[in-house]
Amino acid sequence: MMLRLTWVAPEIKSLPRLAWLTELGDLQNIPNVQVVACTGPSLTRADVARALSSPADLVLWSGHGEAGCLALSENMSIKPHWLALQVKNANPRLVVLAGCSTMLRDSDLKSMAELCCRQGLNTIGLPAEAADNDVVRFNVELVRALAANSEIGDAFDVALEEVEGTKLAEGIFLLPGLRNTYPNFNVRLMNLENQFVGLRADIRSLMDWAKIPSRSVDQVTGEPPSVLSEGTVMRGSGKPRQANGHVVGLRARK
């Protein structure tokens, strides 16, 4: 099965040149990997958004970064919320933010990796310092393992062993995607309530046909609490009960 990889690698002339050619060449030589490359010295947000609009199994951002942002051009950077929403369009199994400090929070307490994680995306983030050659080795072995049909966690372990003993290995982490299931719970609850209402109606019709007093329905299904006024709910007998309603460093070559 072919692994679809979207590889984003902005080139910023004022920053140290990274080993992009080595990384890209090694990635393209891995069997069963289809690479869509978005790279160059003049990338724009539109270029990145266009690349991320296509489905991908893996999104790999390879570049310079600091806490709370990734460098895109000389005067432009990518912020966490923008990246998280755009990456989500590709619906990848895994996102790798291979720029320094993508694990760390900025002064506004925003982390690149954490925001992607909260969008339900499995995400790998880097520490404040990581040697470029180590990052390339990690990325290549991660992709090679994924292309061999490894699970994400197993592929991460394989790549981590490749850079054992480095600063990268000390601070790189895999964050499982967090999915907010609360809205789905509300939908399921509403569906159950609708089914209950329908069941009550069926029972009433059956009892009318059998000429059973409708009062008996309440004994079978239960009657909802009687609402007297806003904030006050009666529960059977007794007194009314009040209801309370209402991540800083650049990825550097060594």
Image: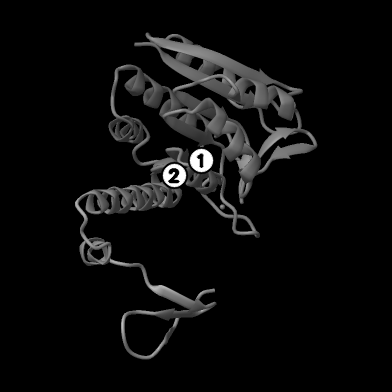
Query: What is the total number of numbered labels drawn onto the structure image?
Result: 2
Amino acid type, residue under disc 1 in the picture:
Ala
**Going by the picture, which residue comes out furthest to the right?**
75
Q: Looking at the image, which residue is at 49% across and 47% down? A: 118
Q: Position of residue 201 (x, y in %)?
A: 33, 51
Q: Residue furthest bottom?
A: 239
Q: Quadrant of residue 144?
A: top left
Can residue 2 be spotted in the picture? Answer: yes
Residue where numbered disc 2 is placed: 167
Q: Which quadrant is home to the C terminus?
A: top right
Instruction: Depth check: give the residue in front, 248 or 245.
Output: 245
Q: Residue at x 65, y 60 (%)?
A: 107
Instruction: Look at mark 1 in the image and give the residue it sits on.
Output: 130
Q: Is residue 224 left or right of residue 76?
A: left
Which of 4 and 25 lies nearest the eye of the viewer? 4
- First-in-chain label (2 vs 1): 1
Q: Residue 214, relative to residue 96: is it above or below?
A: below
Callout 2 touching callout 1 (CB < 8 Å): yes
Residue 54 sits above or below residue 169 on the image:
above
Which residue is at a point 60% across and 59% down the rendered structure image? 109
Location of residue 147 in the rendering, given as x and y in whole percent from the top left corner: 35, 17
Residue type at mark 2 is Lys
